[in-house]
Amino acid sequence: NCQIDRYYDWIVSSIDENSLFLKIKIIFAFASQKIKANHIAEMCGEKIEDVVIVLNKLYPLVVCDSSKYYTFHNDVINRFILSFHHQIPAFRRKCDANL
């Protein structure tokens, strides 16, 4: 649905594309269960406060239930996975430039 895609894009584009956001997208692209914010912070090597800010900005794509976060719908997981496909060429160029 085009309207849903625009809505997802609007939510995701409102968040700064930094390393924390990228790590959170990776985690939720492959997570199969609800995850506590402090576990996400540990996986990302970031402060829990910073992680919670990003997670809250992702609402309603990422939802909190009893202090555990999960993706609301499989479309969100697919969107996160597809976003990596678009970022891989730029990431490779950046890595090659640093060699």
Image (spheres, grey):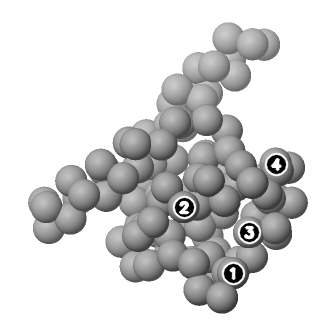
- Dot 2: what SS? helix
Apparent side of residue 6 relative to residue 74 in the rendered image (left or right): left
Q: Which residue is mark 1?
A: 67
Lower sequence index among marks 4 and 1: 4
Cα distance between the residues tagged 4 and 1: 18 Å
Are the residues at dot 4 and dot 3 in contact (C-beta closer than 8 Å)?
A: no
Lower sequence index among marks 1 and 2: 2
Cα distance between the residues tagged 4 and 3: 11 Å
Q: Which residue is mark 3?
A: 37
Residue, x 67% and y 38% (percent of image)? 19
Label 1 amino acid? Answer: Ser
Circle nearer the viewer, 4 or 1: 1
Indicate whether 12 appears above or below 56.
Answer: above
Disc on res. 46: 4
Residue 17 in sight from this viewpoint: yes
Cα distance between the residues tagged 3 and 1: 7 Å
Indicate whether 26 appears above or below 93.
Answer: below
Residue, x 70% and y 55% (percent of image)? 51
Residue, x 78% and y 13% (percent of image)? 99
Indicate whether 35 appears above or below 88.
Answer: below
Cα distance between the residues tagged 2 and 4: 16 Å
Lower sequence index among marks 3 and 1: 3
Circle nearer the viewer, 2 or 4: 2
Q: Which residue is mark 2?
A: 56
Quadrant of res 28: bottom right
